[in-house]
Image (cartoon, grey):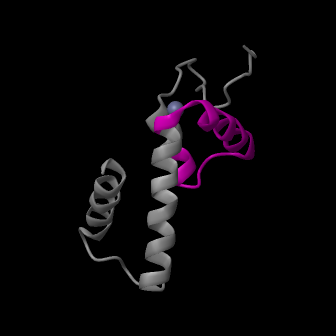
Amino acid sequence: MTNQVNPFILADGKKPSCMEMLQLILDGEASAEQQAYFKSHMDKCAPCFKTYDLDITIKELLKTRCCGDSVPAGLVDQIKNQISLNKAS
Ligand SMILES: [Zn+2]
């Protein structure tokens, strides 16, 4: 085990959850350090990898389909449901 310092740890010493880390990454608010840490974390954490992969897929899909126009409400959920259904089968 390497004892890598987690750059996501907050000033108060609280260790963030996977979801909190993901949120920062996906919002584009993570620093370069945090992004690098998260990349190596994803190699070992399947839930993070799946969520990250899913989100990137959806963003790419929306970019090509909607050309930057506002996304209709519910579309993202619809796509997410479809993808998770496909993956489950
Ligand atoms: Zn994780």
Q: Is residue 67 magenta?
A: no
Q: Is residue 42 magenta?
A: yes
Front residue of 26 and 1: 1
In this picture, residue 30 sits left or right of residue 45: right
In this picture, residue 42 sits left or right of residue 69: right
**Relative height, residue 75 to residue 28 (above, below):** below
The residue positioned 68% from the left and 44% from the top of the image is 35
The residue positioned 53% from the left and 21% from the top of the image is 15
The picture places residue 54, in percent across and down from the top left corner, at 45, 55
Q: Which residues are magenta?
A: 24-47
The picture places residue 5, in percent across and down from the top left corner, at 72, 22
The picture places residue 58, in percent across and down from the top left corner, at 44, 65
The residue positioned 57% from the left and 48% from the top of the image is 25
In this picture, residue 65 sits left or right of residue 14: left
**Relative height, residue 53 to residue 16 (above, below):** below
Would residue 6 be visible to someone looking at this image?
yes
